[in-house]
Each structure stands twice: as structure tokens, then as C-alpha cells.
Amino acid sequence: MFTTRGLAGLRTAAVALGLVAFGSVGAHASALINYTTSGQINSTGVTGSPGVISFNSIQNDPTTNTSNSFNTPSDFSLGQFVVAKLPVGASTTYTNTPFSITFLVNTVNGAAPNPNQTPIVVTGELNGTVSGAGQSNVEATFDPINNSTFLTGTLSNTLSIPNSPLSLVPSSTNGGQTSAQAFLTATDSGGGGGPTNQVPEPTSVALFLTVLGGIGIRQRLRAARS
């Protein structure tokens, strides 16, 4: 009687843990995000030639049908800081020079989201000196993002900047272009923001497998006694 009750208890525990393992899932949504950005660099704190550092925004081009899209969760580009070539011996210094990048979601899975709590404005400062065509020690330091969690339809999104400060390369390297990367995750709170990638929690799965193993051992011991 004890063996039967013990086995029944283990089976009940296995079922319960199985429900936990496969019910406790992350609802991280894989959604196709189409977006644009707009970046600006202030002239405050600039000593030397103005406009040496500019920002290339991310824009859709209807003439070439270019689409700026990515599938969440993913890194993506907010645009590029561009360092222009200076004459030999010339230099420009940036001291706490403000910049801002505006991020706008246009569509989610091909449709305009409602609500749409973008645009989100990412801000920061430039510090350092550009000299000639081959030297730059300028760094772009990003501020903490206000309203980093926002809604686009049924998706709850979180935006972050993985690389800060960001070193800006000189004109002689990669055309002076340095990509400003962001990272976006999305959680589908209402089932309409895109398909979800559901993965059982590792701890729950481990407990589930442990109980199943215990049941197997118990059954073998019972069979050996028979």
C-alpha cells in the first residue's frame, strides 16, 4: 500500500511539475519591426571647425523600395556617426556636446501598431578631439533611455544601448563611419503582436526530469521485489 501511494504521489508531482515546466514560458515575441531614425548633433561645446561629426539617420527609401526592418529580439542600427576629413594640422574638439537620436516604429508585422508609443529619443554627449584625417579619440556616451519600455500594439518593447561609450573612428577608417547599435526585445501581451517563441524555464525542466527519473527508479525497484 505504501509503494502504491508513493508511486501515485510521484506521478502527481510529475504532472504538476510538467505543467509548471511547460506553462512557465517566456512570451518573447518574434516580430518584424520596420523603423526609421533621425539624429542631430548640437554645436554646443565644439572648438574648431564646425560640423566635423555628423549623423546619418536610418530612413526608408521609396525610390529603391528599401526597408529598414529586423526581427525581435535583435541588435539593430540607429544610424552612423560620421567623422569628416580635416586638413593636416587642423583639429576640432568636442566637450560635452549633446546629440540626440529619435527612434520611430513604423509597422509591426506589416501593420501600423495601435497604440504606438514611439518615437523614443536617445540622447548623449560627445567628448574628444578629431585631428586631420587619421586621428580621433572622440567618444559618444549615451544617457539612460527615458521610457525605454513602450508599447507598439500588443507588444511591450524594451530598448537598450549595448555599447556605451562608443569610440568614433577617424575619416581614414571605414570612411569615418561608426554605427550606433541598439537592442530591442518584445513581449506579446495580447497574442496579436506576432508569433511567440516559447521556451520552458530551465529550472522547471530540470525538476520535471528529476521527478520522472525518480518514478523510473521506483518502478524498477518495485518490479525487482515482485
Image (cartoon, helix red, strand yellow):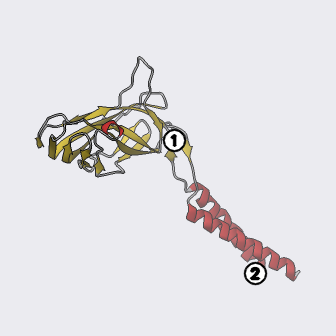
- Tell me whether circle 2 and circle 1 mark residues in contact (CB < 8 Å): no
Residue at x 25% of width, y 46% of height: 135
Q: Quadrant of the C terminus?
A: bottom right
Tell me the quarter of the picture where residue 120 sits.
top left
Q: Give the quarter of the figure containing the N terminus.
A: bottom right
**Residue 103's image quarter?**
top left
- Under tag 2, what secondary structure? helix
User: How many numbered marks have been drawn onto this rendered protein structure?
Assistant: 2
Helix, strand or loop at mark 1: loop
Residue sitting farthest toward the top: 63
Residue at horizontal 33%, vertical 36%? 175
Judging by the rendered image, the residue that carries numbered circle 1 is 30
- Which residue lies under the disc numbered 2? 2
In the image: residue 51, left or right of residue 102: left
Q: Position of residue 59 (x, y in %)?
A: 35, 27
Badge 1 density bin: few <14, some 14–19, many ≥20, Cα 10 Å = many
Indicate whether 219 appears above or below 40. Answer: below
**Residue at x 72% of width, y 76% of height:** 6
Q: Is residue 53 visible?
A: no
Instruction: Tell me the amino acid under the disc marked 2.
Output: Phe
Residue type, label 1: Ser
Residue 162 in sight in this render: yes
What is the C-alpha distance between the residues marked 2 and 1? 49 Å
- Give whichever of discs 2 and 1 has the lower sequence position: 2
Q: Name the residue located 51 percent from the left edge and 40 percent from the top edge.
A: 191
Residue reaching furthest to the right: 226
**Residues packed near mark 2 inside 10 Å, few (<14), some (14 to 19) or many (20 plus):** few
Residue 23: horizontal and vertical position, in percent? 58, 55
